[in-house]
Amino acid sequence: MKTLIVYYSWRGKTELVATSISNVLDADLRKIEEVKKRKGLFGFISGGYGALKRKCSRIKPLNFSLSSYNLVFIGTPVWALRPTPAINTFISKANFKDKKVVLFVTMGGFGGNKTVKMLTDKIKLKGGIVIASFVVKTGGVKTEDIIKKGEEIGREFLIKKSNCSGLSFYPVE
Ligand SMILES: Cc1cc2nc3c(=O)[nH]c(=O)nc-3n(C[C@H](O)[C@H](O)[C@H](O)COP(=O)(O)O)c2cc1C
């Protein structure tokens, strides 16, 4: 089963989780990057506002296609209790028809479940099947513990694979 981990990360915490999952699963790793680099307080405020208004931002061209993968992990930080504008753009551009998707979101401390619900609805609308989701708290959490959490997420899928049940996950509602 070929697996892709695709993520957006502004400050590197979602990247830590994404990298740890990909290391455990030996999966391909792709980062979504915005065309305009976000900086400082303005980057923070415009990011929060964009997320609040469910906006999309311009992202750099994607050098991959989901069609090569059976399973796709999508990761984003939580901004203003919502997905980030960059991940909104990625989801709006991608073809999820019959694709199995695992979501992981990182957050300071609140809004993770709401963000997962919003992402799940978007992916469902585009024909994808969200089979699992993970909320990772990063606020006040040590780097090594964030990495461990990513590895744990990856290991869950390794176990499922070795049980020959890799293709029979239950969709989350
Ligand atoms: C613009 C902005 C809005 C945020 N809003 C929330 C929020 O609503 N809830 C929360 O728990 N954390 C919030 N955070 C914190 C991030 O979700 C958290 O630090 C995340 O792990 C950062 O991921 P990154 O390092 O990959 O960018 C926000 C951060 C930013 C920059």
Image (cartoon, rainbow, N blue to C red):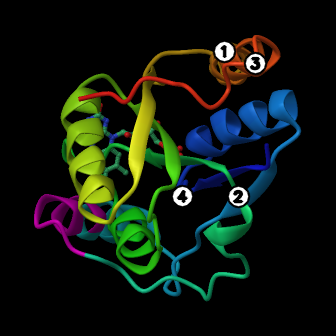
The residue beneath circle 1 is 156
The residue beneath circle 3 is 164
**Is disc 3's CB within 8 Å of ligand 1?**
no
Instruction: Please say whether residue 52 is one of the residues in the magenta stretch.
Output: yes
Q: Nearer the viewer, mark 2 or mark 3?
A: 3
Residue at (31% x, 70% y) in the render: 42
For disc 3, the neighbor class at 10 Å (few under 14, some 14 to 19, many from 20) is few
Q: Amino acid at mark 4?
A: Tyr
Q: Is residue 136 left or right of residue 127?
A: right
Figure check: 161 above or below 118 = above
**Is disc 4's CB within 8 Å of ligand 1?**
yes
Q: Earlier in the sequence, mark 1 or mark 4?
A: 4
Instruction: Please say whether residue 129 is one of the residues in the magenta stretch.
Output: no
What is the quadrant of residue 162 in the picture? top right
Q: Earlier in the sequence, mark 1 or mark 2?
A: 2
Query: Which residues are drawn in magenta?
Result: 47-55
Proximity of marks 1 and 2: CB atoms separated by less than 8 Å: no
Label drawn at residue 69: 2
Q: Amino acid at mark 2?
A: Tyr
Secondary structure found at label 3: loop
Spot occupied by residue 119 in the image (x, y as percentages of width and height):
29, 49
Q: Amino acid at mark 1?
A: Glu
The residue beneath circle 4 is 8
Secondary structure found at label 4: loop
Q: Is residue 155 left or right of residue 128?
A: right
For disc 4, the neighbor class at 10 Å (few under 14, some 14 to 19, many from 20) is many
Spot occupied by residue 23 in the image (x, y as percentages of width and height):
86, 34
